[in-house]
Amino acid sequence: MSTKIAFFHGKSDKWYFNIMNFAIRVWTFGRYNHCELIQCPTENPDDWMWYSSSSFVDNGTRKKYIKPNLNKWDIYELDDKFNYTLAFEWMERRLGMKYDWVGIWLSQFMHTGINSPKRWFCSEFNSAALQQTALMHNDRKSPQSYSPNRLYEKLSNMGALHKWIG
């Protein structure tokens, strides 16, 4: 079983999603506005379970199957020398929690670091899960300080990302 992480850079069919996506990309100085941690029992993308916290669509933490459009997603294999079981177990215990609207505004846009301990936004949820593993166990940054772009930069600088071609 492998673990991947996906970063969204595409456009939505809905104009209001595109406004929010654009605002996140501009404000966080990067090309990504959403991220998902993926549990991959096989190399067939139809078998992959995607974990994240999604605002409008799912209103919080969830897992689901997503058919990836490689024109909209950048997918990376995470370094396979680490065991990610604890990350997925941690996320499973938090499924169904609400989206952290207050946290995303106060920690990402206002930079106060204030968030709700019972609500999550995507990069906060994924970075907190990865902090359960040896990959990011020594990371001292609070999960809410990560935007999708900051999480990408952190993992990339660690050499933990390997582009999945499909």
Image: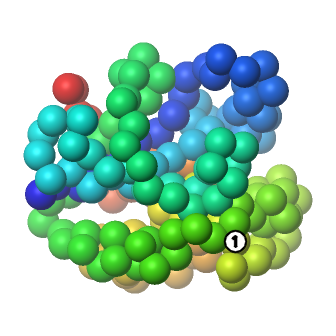
- Nearest to the observer: residue 2 or residue 163: 2
- Nearest to the observer: residue 111 or residue 44: 44
Instruction: Tell me the residue that label 1 is attached to.
Output: 119
- Nearest to the observer: residue 41 or residue 138: 41
**At label 1, which amino acid type do we have?**
Arg
Horizontal relation, residue 110 to residue 56: left or right: right
- Nearest to the observer: residue 158 or residue 133: 133
User: Counting other residues with Cα less than 10 Å from the Cα at mark 1, is it few (<14), some (14-19), or many (20 or more)?
Assistant: many
Q: Quadrant of the N terminus?
A: bottom left
Horizontal relation, residue 120 to residue 157: left or right: right
The secondary element bearing badge 1 is classed as: loop
- In the rendered image, which quarter is residue 66 located in? top left
- In the rendered image, which quarter is residue 6 located in? top left
Question: What residue appears at the point 21 percent right and 51 percent down from the top-left corner?
Answer: 40
Q: Quadrant of the C terminus?
A: top left
Residue 164 visible in rendering: yes
> Residue 151, how many percent across, how many down?
50, 55
> Residue 154, how many percent across, how many down?
45, 57
Question: What residue appears at the point 64 percent right and 59 percent down from the top-left corner?
Answer: 60
Residue 159 visible in rendering: no
Horizontal relation, residue 66 to residue 150: left or right: left
> Residue 134, how many percent across, how many down?
28, 78
Give the vertical position of 139 relative to 149 (above or below): below
> Residue 80, how many percent across, how many down?
14, 59
Give the vertical position of 11 relative to 87 (above or below): above
Q: How many marks?
A: 1
Question: What residue appears at the point 72 percent right and 21 percent down from the top-left corner?
Answer: 14
- In the rendered image, which quarter is residue 47 located in? top left
